[in-house]
Image (spheres, helix red, strand yellow):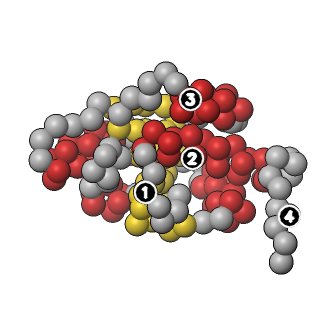
Amino acid sequence: MKLVAIGRLKSGPERELFDRYAARIRPTLTVTELPASKGSVEEQKRRDASALLGACPDNAFIIALDEGGKVHGSLQFASLFSRWQETGRPLHFLIGGAEGLDSSVIQRADAVISLGAMTWPHMLVRVMIAEQIFRARAINSNHPYHKDTRPD
């Protein structure tokens, strides 16, 4: 399982949180960081798309993180995650740069998800998706990490 992202996560609280969740995920979540592109917005998106997709094998099950994607609750995400794993294909979560994902990435993706309607810095998105992957694994294995006790 791999997280492929534009940009480098520097030392600091975001890195510490990401490392904390990533260390707890099995199978291991590895990270491929790609340099941000320069040029016009369209040029950046095109170059980033080429780099992101180039970092994925042909048989990868690609999950694009995009603000236009479908929003899922944690229980729904856990169910989807389980189904994605059952494909036997390597899971690759893709995070674009500051300009977002090119349409070619969205078209190639097997799933497009959003972490909500708000805009999040892409460095925080790494932490959030690592935590949700860990949570999904906990839910799917009946581990008590996830609390589903909201009042009606």
Q: Please say whether residue 112 is visible from this viewpoint.
A: no
Of callouts 2 and 4, which one flags the residue occurring earlier in the amino acid sequence? 2
- Which residue in the structure is indicated by mark 1? 119
Q: Is residue 137 left or right of residue 40?
A: right
Image x and y of residue 9, in percent: 44, 29
Marks 4 and 1 sit apart, C-alpha to C-alpha, by 27 Å
Name the amino acid, label 1: Thr
Residue 134: give x, y in percent of width and height. 69, 43
Give the CA distance from mark 1 to mark 2. 14 Å
- Of the numbered discs 3 and 4, the one sitting upstream in the chain is 3
Give the foreground label among 2 and 3.
Answer: 3
Indicate the quadrant containing the N terminus: top left, top right, bottom left or bottom right: top right
Q: Residue at x 64, y 60 (%)?
A: 77
Q: From the viewer's perspective, is 21 left or right of 69?
A: right
Q: Where is residue 113 drawn, in percent x and y? A: 49, 61
Numbered disc 4: secondary structure:
loop
Q: Is residue 128 left or right of residue 60?
A: right
**Vertically, is 9 above or below 1?**
above
Lower position in the chain sequence, tag 3 or tag 1: 3
- Which residue carries the number 4 mark? 149
Q: Give the residue drawn at x 66%, y 35%.
A: 21
Residue at 35% x, 60% y is 106
Q: What amino acid is found at the position of numbered circle 4 in the picture?
A: Thr
**Amino acid at pointer 2:** Ile
Disc 2 target residue:
129
Q: Amino acid at mark 3?
A: Pro
Please state which of residues 62 and 127 is positioned toward the viewer in this rendering: 127
Q: CA separation, marks 3 and 1?
A: 19 Å
Check the image and name the residue furthest to the bottom. 152
Q: First in sequence: mark 2 or mark 3?
A: 3
Q: In the rendered image, which residue does mark 3 sit on?
A: 13
